């Protein structure tokens, strides 16, 4: 196998891969396979081991089967967490308290999400760069999309909005902040640098998504202050719903234009990225598929089915968990779900930041946030439209304000192409403040305070 240093090419016509909505210029191995930043992030959590016993089996079918099980089930440092999947099914089957089902389902999603990334990479070995990139774009945030669909089927629109908003904020503030903080401390003697091209593109798309979320909110408040008697609440709600659907179509158009921009028309804009980016990565040594194409497809189908099953358990039990734990539904959906659901990917982003590979870190954090904001959120609105559920893009004032400030502070942090630990600390502290805000929202003492204030106002 050729070494990474000798396999890098600067040919502008070379296909690029998409990871979580962010394009990265990639090295090509001897077998024609290219790796994305998302693949490399997930690879940092994989566990390599020899299989001497399996290799000595005489039956080729049994050898392939056991080898596939070994790679998929035990080929990750998170393999022990897979025990939470049957535990969640058993807790549901034996009707254990719903908070237990919720907790087990939440933990079980961590390794399943990482395994989906591994399996999409295996499939991309056989499909080529373009198809592999589109597959990564589709499966990059499959967990959030599946949870959103099950919540919509139960008409839990708030859960959908909260979880998707939380995923964006988690990637922008928690993941990126933790990565920049850890990377800055590990490289404290010098500022870390990164290519601004990818961050500029992602920030512009995030601002477009923010505009589409702000306009329904502004319309609602404008209609509330309208002196026209015809501007009643029913007409306003319908107008906001139609506006949200129109904005969702615009966002989906922007996302597909984004794919074309990165895969075909402007795939050379990242050529200034360092060619040695993958030179010292441990994961670059394994550049061949470890399971077959159809095996990867079967495993991917099975993993997706388990993600769907656990997502259904989550949606069914989230309200019971909120009541039992004394936490607002907004806090669980905005803070806990995104942290646990993307824990594997987040850990990979921090690892590469420690290795001074901020381009990969930005590809994971900003790319995920962009895909959710420009693809998953509008797609959820369209799916809700299809199944006759009235979901709009009005995320209310405090949620939209948090999104605005999160995007703003991230854009300012990344504007100069350099990073140090203080920037990461600021992003992380912003996330803590936002989390504290949603923690006190809808708590009993908060509701009592509001009722007392309203009562005093009436007396006066």
Image (spheres, helix red, strand yellow):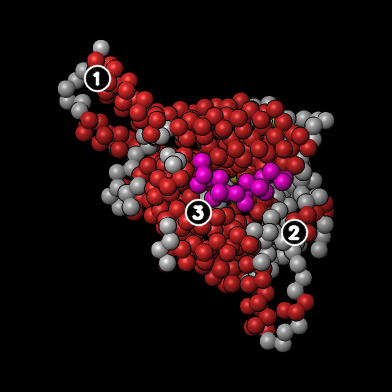
Observer-side mark, 3 or 2, equals 3
Q: Which residues are magenta?
A: 335-352
Residue 148 in view of the camera: no
Spatial separation of the CA atoms under disc 2 and disc 1: 63 Å
| Helix, strand or loop at mark 3 | helix
Counting from the top left corner in percent of width and height, residue 140 is at 55, 52
Residue sticking out furthest to the left: 229
Q: Would you call the spot at circle 3 few (<14 residues within 10 Å), some (14-19), or many (20 or more)?
A: some
The quarter of the picture where residue 171 lies is: top right
| Helix, strand or loop at mark 1 | loop
Query: 192 above or below 10?
Result: above
Residue identifier under label 1: 226
Q: Nearer the viewer, residue 29 or 346?
A: 346
- Is residue 350 inside the magenta stretch? yes
Q: Which mark is residue 103?
A: 3
Observer-side mark, 3 or 1, equals 3
């Amino acid at each position: 196998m050729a070494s990474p240093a000798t396999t890098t090419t600067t040919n502008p016509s070379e296909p690029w891969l998409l990871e979580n909505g962010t394009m990265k210029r990639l090295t090509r191995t001897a077998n024609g396979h290219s790796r994305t930043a998302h693949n490399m992030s997930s690879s940092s959590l994989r566990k390599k081991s020899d299989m001497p016993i399996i290799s000595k089996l005489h039956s080729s079918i049994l050898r392939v089967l056991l080898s596939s099980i070994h790679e998929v089930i035990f080929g990750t440092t998170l393999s022990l967490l897979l025990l939470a999947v049957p535990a969640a099914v058993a807790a549901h089957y034996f009707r254990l308290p719903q908070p237990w089902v919720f907790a087990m389902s939440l933990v079980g999603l961590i390794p399943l999400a990482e395994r989906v990334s591994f399996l999409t990479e295996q499939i991309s070995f056989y499909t080529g760069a373009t198809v592999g990139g589109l597959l990564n774009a589709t499966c990059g945030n499959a967990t959030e999309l599946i949870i959103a669909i099950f919540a919509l089927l139960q008409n839990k629109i708030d859960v959908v909005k909260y979880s998707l908003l939380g995923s964006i904020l988690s990637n922008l503030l928690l993941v990126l902040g933790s990565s920049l903080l850890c990377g800055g401390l590990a490289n404290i003697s010098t500022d870390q640098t990164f290519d601004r091209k990818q961050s500029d593109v992602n920030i512009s798309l995030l601002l477009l998504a923010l505009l589409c979320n702000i306009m329904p909110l502004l319309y609602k408040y404008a209609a509330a202050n309208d002196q026209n008697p015809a501007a009643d609440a029913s007409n306003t709600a319908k107008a906001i719903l139609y506006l949200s659907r129109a904005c969702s179509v615009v966002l989906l158009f922007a996302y597909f234009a984004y794919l074309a921009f990165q895969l075909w028309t402007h795939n050379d804009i990242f050529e200034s990225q360092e060619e040695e980016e993958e030179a010292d990565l441990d994961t670059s040594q394994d550049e061949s598929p470890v399971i077959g194409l159809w095996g990867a497809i079967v495993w991917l189908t099975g993993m997706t089915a388990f993600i769907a099953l656990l997502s259904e358990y989550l949606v069914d039990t989230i309200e019971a968990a909120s009541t039992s734990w004394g936490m607002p539904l907004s806090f669980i959906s905005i803070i806990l779900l995104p942290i646990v659901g993307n824990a594997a990917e987040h850990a990979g982003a921090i690892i590469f930041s420690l290795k001074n590979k901020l381009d990969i870190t930005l590809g994971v954090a900003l790319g995920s946030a962009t895909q959710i904001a420009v693809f998953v959120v509008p797609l959820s609105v369209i799916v809700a439209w299809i199944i006759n559920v009235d979901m709009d893009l009005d995320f209310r004032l405090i949620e939209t304000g948090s999104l605005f400030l999160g995007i703003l502070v991230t854009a300012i942090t990344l504007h100069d192409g350099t990073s140090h630990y203080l920037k990461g600390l600021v992003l992380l502290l912003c996330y803590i403040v936002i989390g504290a805000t949603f923690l006190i929202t809808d708590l009993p003492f908060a509701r009592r305070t509001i009722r007392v204030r309203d009562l005093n106002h009436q007396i006066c």
